[in-house]
Image (tube, rainbow, N blue to C red):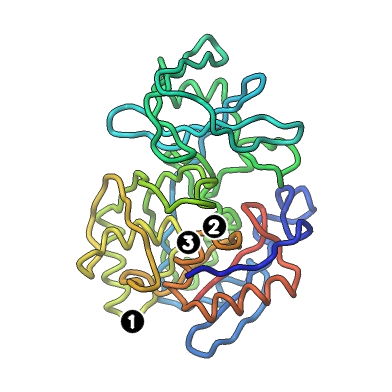
Amino acid sequence: MSIDFALPPIREAHEPPEARGLARDAVRLMVSRRDTGAITHHGFAELPSILAPGDLLVVNNSATLPAAVRLDRLAVHFSTELPSGEWLVELRRRTPTATEPYLGGSAGEWLPLPGRATLRLIAPETPRLWRALLDRDVPAYLAKHGTPIRYSYVERDWPLADYQTVFAVEPGSAEMPSAGRPFTTPLVTDLVARGISVAPITLHTGVASPEKDEPPYAERFAVPEQTARLVTMTRAAGGRVIAVGTTVVRALETAALDGTVRAVSGCTSHIVTPAEGVRAVDGLITGLHEPRSSHLMMLSAVAGADLVAASYRAALAEGYLWHEFGDTHLLL
């Protein structure tokens, strides 16, 4: 099952909302309701009045790494750290405006990187990703030589701070867990004052580009004991558990394979599908995703394919903006 549509370039967000004269929480919010099929349009700052006291927002506290390292003709995107100490990396060809996939490289090849570092390609993991080994500590190296990953629809570099959310405390994501970007400290304060709880998980995102052709691959995650308890207590009291981002859905559903969310950490390869549905979440705040992406399967698992398809038609008709600097979608 896939949801297909044409995404005009004019509907892509090319820069952070702040560069468009907007506050982070001034992006638009589309709300889609399963019980009535209603689709309504709001500002993101209205979220406290849309949710109800007793609801629980589960957020991803992973912080974004400056995960792109640029060479003269290529770029290396560091995606996911493996238990072996190797990393999944994506090689990309540099263009005048951004990068594009590069399917070259060979097992055993050594790539010289800035700062006299060397990256050894070990073996292909997927058609786009390599298992690779850097000759030094990767996070420290990226802090000195890396820049945030960006794709061609973002027309220039932006500071790493523009790729962090207000919840970011655990460095490790190759790309921003962008559903959390519109939240601000005052907005979180308003949510809590209304009786809406906030609890963290950690899931370090990998590079998004493989989702065009491949299922999601394993990502590192942790669901802490306190969050697991809050999920159980919220549902027992009749509240709703609302995931802030597809990463949170993946983490919570991995932690609830027997139907109850439990504290767990490690790597998850779990794929949320409409056939399986969801056990741990009642709603989802997310961005707007590309046609046929695996994320749309997850949205359909949460809210049903018909409502997701209708919502995307409405988003296109109403002029919503896509991608990490774009508008947002709440499915209830």
Which amino acid is tagged 1? Gly
Q: Residue beneath label 3, please? A: 244
Q: Quadrant of residue 31?
A: bottom right
What is the distance, in whole Å, between disc 1 and disc 2 at their CAs?
A: 25 Å
Which of the numbered marks, if any, corresponds to residue 179? 2
Residue 160 place in picture, x, y as percent: 61, 36
**SS under mark 1:** loop
**Residue mark closest to the camera, 1 vs 2:** 2
According to the image, label 1 marks what residue?
A: 238
Asked whether the residues under the numbered discs 1 and 3 touch, taking CB atoms below 8 Å apart as contact, a structural biologist would say: no
Looking at the image, which residue is at 57% across and 21% down? 145
Local crowd size for mark 1, using a 10 Å CA cut-off: few (<14), some (14–19), many (≥20): few
Pointer 1 or 3: first along the chain: 1
Q: Amino acid at mark 2?
A: Ala
Q: Residue at x 43, y 73 (%)?
A: 302
Of residues 32 and 239, which is closer to you in this image? 32
Element marked by disc 2: helix
Q: Is residue 208 above or below residue 113?
A: below
- Tell me how far mark 1 sits from mark 3, CA to CA: 19 Å
- Cα separation, mark 2 vs mark 3, equals 6 Å
Point 57% across, 25% down: residue: 69
Nearest to N terminus: mark 1 or mark 2: 2
